[in-house]
Image (cartoon, grey):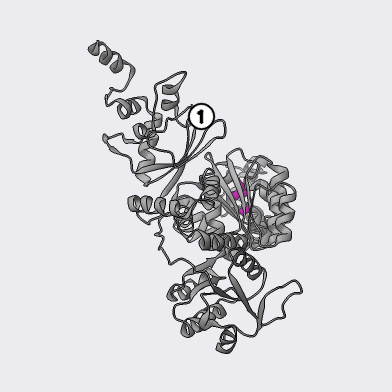
């Protein structure tokens, strides 16, 4: 069905039902006309003809099988004969009409039009902020599950009907409007809420770079102020997206290359990043740090090229094992062979290798490489690429040190960008921090909150997001520190289970891990990490003047204007 024709659902139905309806109208008209012509008798037995009103009344309840009765008087033989003919004609007409109607309901285009119309109506009824997700694959399902846990609404467009059906089987907290359609069409994106004022962002997460590029262009032209997060695994597509100003381009392969580089020169910072950007509700398991030395890389595609560059940037020697010939620009040791077999691994020197990366496009081959390498060298550091989520049980059963799951990387990046925009610049600073400093920060925070992925949120001190605190500060309010603000509103003697990681001032000055005695200012943006309960408690403090006064001064002021006046008189 061509996008945009869903508005003609009624006209499509009328067009398909035109012949049956015309036939019914003709049958009714002939039946009524015949009854007015056929002679009958009145109540006194005198010859009389039926009026149009009585004829129409009789046909209305007889032809629709509601009932039967001879009105206004008993029929003559001629009238009964004509009534019998009318009954048979109406049965034929109704049979044809109902058959056509049932066939229409089974028509694929008509049912698709109805689904589009229901979907568009559901999107229009959304009165709260939502995100538009294009593609319900492994990445989309991870992201939607995380957003749903956080209480955020989502609208989904998926071209595969089977995948869209899987979404309906999931136990999400909120209803998720879902449309089976090609997201490349701008009209489909409009129906999905791209230009809706409540839309907070669009994510192109399909497994086709061309489709993601089309979505990025549509978002740039139809909703230029809306953040667009687009997945791309091709350098050419990424460059194309960047050329017209796509907000965020996420290449999971390139991103893992950066992670590996970070893990080699600052392992603690990498652990910190994993802990902060994990999916809510899971526990991050600390793993051993990747060693320097000599590494083997099995499979030299786009991913292998990126990882080779990352390893060499950290001064790591790399030997590539691949069944193909090395490209012309390749420099280094290249072993041509099948890495799933022991001879190729031995030829590459697996017994002396510090680490091995299995990154071919087949999950079974990757697992075979890892098992063989561990058999030949039990303490080798293993990085496994998992291509399909359905193979997760197999990868869970093998004790790899790091696992590369593109869908997980993209989902984590999207969550960080959408839910806590301050997290992105904070992580950039962490990546360039000192290893000893990162280690102390990780030990302190995980010692306080554990290795469960914490709740991370942003707070802006203004009249909209923190009205009570903003009014307290303006125009020249008292000095308020982080230590004074982060107290439990139910008992200020206890500190809230949260901590401020990052502050951005109105002059763009950034403060990394501010001290507890740092003074807050109006307009500050805070990046906060902690337990979920602390978020609600802090929100109460920021929004309720009485709660804020209690947290700052210890005075428990009664609520309401009258009680405040009485309390102030009593104090005087």
Q: Nearer the viewer, residue 518 or 36?
A: 518
Is 247 rendered above or below residue 88?
Answer: above
Q: Residue furthest right?
A: 328
Q: Nearer the viewer, residue 68 or 515?
A: 515
Question: What residue did someone put label 1 on?
Answer: 523
- Horizontally, residue 540 falls left or right of residue 197, namely left
Q: Quadrant of residue 399?
A: bottom left
Secondary structure that dominates the magenta span: helix
Q: Secondary structure at mark 1?
A: loop
Is 126 rendered above or below residue 69?
Answer: above
Is 363 rendered above or below residue 132?
Answer: below
Which part of the image, by quadrant, shows the C terminus?
top left
Expressed as whole percent of the image width and height from the top left, the position of residue 400 reads 46, 73
**Dot 1 alpha-carbon crowd within 10 angstroms: few under 14, some 14 to 19, many 20 or more:** some
Expressed as whole percent of the image width and height from the top left, the position of residue 209 reads 69, 61
- Magenta region, residue range: 115-120
Q: Residue furthest left?
A: 570
- Horizontally, residue 408 falls left or right of residue 81, namely left
The residue depicted at 56 percent of the width and 83 percent of the height is 349
Q: Quadrant of residue 325?
A: bottom right
Q: Is residue 520 visible?
A: yes
Is 181 rendered above or below residue 478?
Answer: below
* Magenta residue check for 118: yes
The residue depicted at 68 percent of the width and 46 percent of the height is 219
The residue depicted at 55 percent of the width and 41 percent of the height is 125
Q: Is residue 4 visible?
A: no
Q: Residue furthest bottom?
A: 343
Disc count in the image? Answer: 1
Expressed as whole percent of the image width and height from the top left, the position of residue 407 reads 55, 62
* Magenta residue check for 502: no
Which part of the image, by quadrant, shows the N terminus?
bottom right
- Horizontally, residue 244 falls left or right of residue 560, namely right
């Amino acid at each position: 069905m061509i996008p945009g024709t869903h508005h003609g659902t009624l006209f499509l139905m009328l067009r398909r039902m035109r012949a049956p309806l015309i036939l019914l109208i003709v049958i009714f008209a002939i039946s009524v006309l015949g009854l007015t012509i056929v002679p009958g008798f009145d109540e006194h037995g005198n010859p009389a003809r039926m009026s149009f009103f009585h004829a129409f009344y009789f046909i209305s309840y007889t032809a629709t099988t509601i009932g039967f009765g001879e009105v206004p008087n008993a029929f003559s033989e001629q009238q009964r004969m004509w009534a019998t003919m009318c009954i048979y004609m109406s049965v034929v007409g109704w049979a044809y009409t109902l058959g056509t109607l049932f066939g229409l309901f089974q028509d694929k285009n008509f049912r698709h039009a109805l689904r589009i119309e229901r979907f568009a109506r559901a999107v229009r009824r959304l009165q709260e902020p939502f995100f538009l997700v294009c593609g319900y694959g492994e990445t989309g399902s991870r992201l939607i599950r995380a957003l749903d846990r956080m209480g955020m609404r989502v609208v989904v467009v998926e071209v595969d009907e089977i995948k869209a059906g899987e979404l309906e089987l999931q136990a999400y907290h909120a209803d998720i409007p879902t449309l089976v359609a090609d997201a490349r069409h701008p009209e489909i994106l409009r129906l999905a809420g791209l230009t809706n004022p409540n839309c907070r962002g669009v994510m192109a997460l399909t497994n086709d770079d061309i489709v993601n590029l089309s979505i990025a262009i549509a978002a740039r032209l139809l909703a230029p102020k809306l953040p667009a997060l687009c997945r791309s695994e091709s350098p050419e597509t990424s460059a194309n997206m960047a050329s017209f100003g796509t907000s965020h381009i996420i290449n999971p392969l390139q991103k893992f290359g950066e992670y590996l580089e970070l893990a080699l020169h600052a392992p603690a910072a990498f652990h910190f990043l994993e802990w902060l950007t994990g999916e809510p509700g899971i526990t991050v398991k600390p793993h051993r740090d990747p060693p320097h030395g000599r590494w083997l890389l099995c499979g030299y595609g786009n991913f292998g090229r990126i990882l080779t560059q990352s390893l060499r940037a950290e001064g790591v020697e790399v030997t590539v094992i691949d069944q193909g010939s090395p490209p012309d620009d390749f420099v280094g040791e290249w072993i041509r062979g099948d890495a799933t077999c022991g001879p190729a691994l031995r030829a590459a020197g697996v017994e002396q290798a510090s680490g091995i990366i299995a990154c071919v496009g087949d999950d079974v081959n990757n697992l075979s490489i890892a098992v063989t390498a561990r058999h030949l060298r039990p303490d080798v550091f293993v990085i496994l690429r998992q291509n399909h989520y359905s193979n997760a049980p197999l990868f869970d059963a093998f004790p790899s040190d790091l696992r590369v799951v593109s869908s997980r990387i993209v989902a984590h990046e999207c969550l960080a960008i959408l839910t806590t925009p301050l997290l992105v610049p904070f992580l950039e600073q962490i990546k360039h921090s000192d290893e000893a400093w990162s280690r102390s920060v990780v030990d302190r925070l995980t010692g306080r909150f554990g290795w469960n992925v914490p709740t991370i949120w942003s707070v802006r001190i203004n009249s909209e997001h923190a009205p009570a605190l903003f009014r307290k500060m303006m125009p020249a309010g008292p000095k308020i520190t982080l230590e004074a603000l982060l107290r439990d509103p139910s008992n200020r003697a206890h500190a809230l289970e949260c901590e401020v990681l990052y502050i951005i001032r109105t002059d763009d000055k950034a403060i990394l891990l501010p001290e507890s005695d740092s003074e807050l200012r109006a307009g500050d943006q805070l990046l906060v990490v902690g337990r979920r309960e602390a978020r609600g408690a802090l929100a109460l403090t920021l929004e309720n003047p009485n709660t804020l006064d209690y947290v700052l001064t210890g005075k428990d002021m009664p609520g309401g204007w009258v009680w405040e006046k009485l309390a102030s008189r009593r104090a005087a």
